[in-house]
Each structure stands twice: as structure tokens, then as C-alpha cells.
Amino acid sequence: MGAQEPQFISVGKNDSLRKIAVLKDAGEAPGLFWLSGFKSDMSGTKAEALAAHGESLGKQVVRFDYSGHGQSGGKFEDACVSDWLEEATAVFDSSADKETVLVGSSMGGWIALLLALKRKETGKIKGLVLIAPAIDFTEELMWKQRFTDEIRETILTSGRWSQPSAYDDSPYVITRKLIEDGRLHLLFDKPLFLGCPITILQGAEDPDVPRQHAERLVDALPQDDVTLSVVPDGDHRLSRPEDIDLLLRSVDALIGS
């Protein structure tokens, strides 16, 4: 594959300056831009498969790690959606210099939509592929649905709560900052129009982002060309060989559209 050692760009100012790790493989348009999920990074199964596929097609591929994730600087518990969106935007502006398809997984789907709305007028975004998109997850999936009154009270009074992880041995910290900042970026409370095709891949057996959440996103995009593909036995990660094949076929359809 292309360059394996990341380049680093600085995002933010003064005390909020973060070093963000970026991998960019040169190639033709339309390019591919990967956005990872919450507590995931650009070396995951889907990200690596997308990069290899993009290289095989001679396409530009850009991926990066959010602050507090992977090879980027910063502490996870210091960051929030505003930071990760700022980083995604900075990497997109500096590295994705061609017409591009955004590919976002879980939280990366939310960031991809926010980025597409921010950069809609550039004409550079050809389409989106969203894998189990966790739109507004800090509010809709965490605060309202999963958190008990006790957990909410702990976050409000202590400013943090240690969330056990189903995918990692170590728990991760959910901060009051993360919850409150997430409310600045909610998408379900406003009409959405991206002006490009959107493909959503959703596992019917996803315990983290339910199918109804993806269907709600479809309903929120009435003016856009949206395709929802439900994998009957699919989980949240959608990282099995057959899931990866579906992802790459979905990407190919947008590249060629």
C-alpha cells in the first residue's frame, strides 16, 4: 500500500493545539476520505480494506486519527465532537484536494454529515457512505436511552463517568463536556439537505446503533438520494468479509455514479 508513516498537521490554537496523524495515498479522483468511529482509529479493519481498495483502483485515499485516538495527540477525555469535527475539516481542507466520497463509520457517520454540511458549497463532496451512522449519539443513544438516572447524575455532579467497553478491556470516560458539546451539533432537530447521494449500511442486529436510528436518518433527508441497505444478521462493526464486500461495492457505486 501507499505511505504507512503518517504525516502530522496541527489543529487548534494555543492550549487547544493538537497534532493530528494523517495518512494520504496519492491517486485520481474521486478520492476516498475515511472517518473512524468513537474510540476507533484509521488502522481498523474497514479503514485498511478501504485504503487497499482505493489503491487498487488508483484513487486518492485520506484517513486520519481524531485527537485522543490512534496516533494523534491529546487525551480522549479532553476531546469532544467540536474538536473532532474541527480536525476532520482541517484534514479534508488540507489533504482531500479532489472530488471525494466521504466514508464514515458509527460516530464517523455523524462527523461525515457535519463535514458535508460545512463544505457543501465547495462542490468537492461526491457522496457519502455511512456505516451504522451514530447521528446525535451523545444525546439520542447515550443520554436519553442508555444512561440511567444514576449515570446522568454522576456525569452532572462529577463531570465524568467510566463507561465499560464492549470492544476493549479498558473502560472509557464519558465527560459532561462531551455530552454538552454534542448538543451543539445535533442534526435530527433540523431539516437536512446535502445535495449528493448517500448510502447507509446498517446491521439489523446492531446493539449500539439500532436500525430505527438509521431509518430516522433516511426520513431526515427527504430531498436527497438515499439508499439504506440493511444486513439482516449484521452487528455494529460490519467487519466480516461479506460486510467489507458490501462496503466496497457501495463505495464503487458512488465512485462510478
Image (cartoon, rainbow, N blue to C red):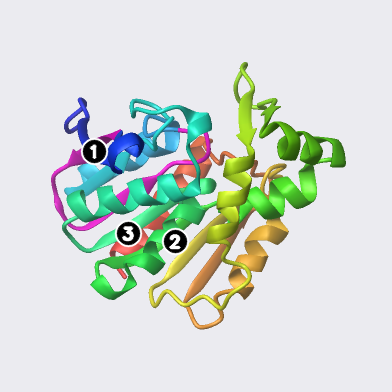
Residue 168 location, x and y as percent?
Answer: 60, 21
Please state the horizontal and vertical placement of residue 142, each as a whole percent of the image: 71, 45
Indicate left or right for 97 with 82 as reference.
left
Image depth: mark 3 or mark 1 in front: 1
Counting from the top left corner in percent of width and height, residue 62 is at: 26, 45
Residue that appears at 22% across and 43% down: 56
Lower sequence index among marks 3 and 1: 1
| Amino acid carrying mark 2 in the image | Leu
| Mark 1 residue element | strand
* Amino acid on which disc 3 is placed: Val
Give the residue at the far bottom of this rendering: 223
Label 3, label 1: how far apart the Cα atoms are: 24 Å
Mark nearest the camera among 2 and 1 is 1
Q: Which residue is mark 2?
A: 114
Q: Residue at x 34, y 46 (%)?
A: 87
Q: Position of residue 240 (x, y in %)?
A: 53, 35
Residue 145 included in the magenta stretch of the image: no
Quarter that holds the N terminus:
top left
If the image is split into quadrants, where does the C terminus sit?
A: bottom left
Tag 3's secondary structure? strand
| Left or right, residue 163 beside residue 201 | right
Label 2 – label 1 distance at C-alpha: 21 Å
Residue 101: give its label.
Answer: 3
Label 2 or label 1, whichever comes before in sequence order? 1
Residue 164 seen in the current view: yes
Q: Main secondary structure of the magenta part?
A: strand
Residues tagged 3 and 1 counted as in contact (Cβ below 8 A): no
Q: Are marks 2 and 1 in contact (CB under 8 Å)?
A: no
Give the residues drawn in magenta, as a range: 19-40
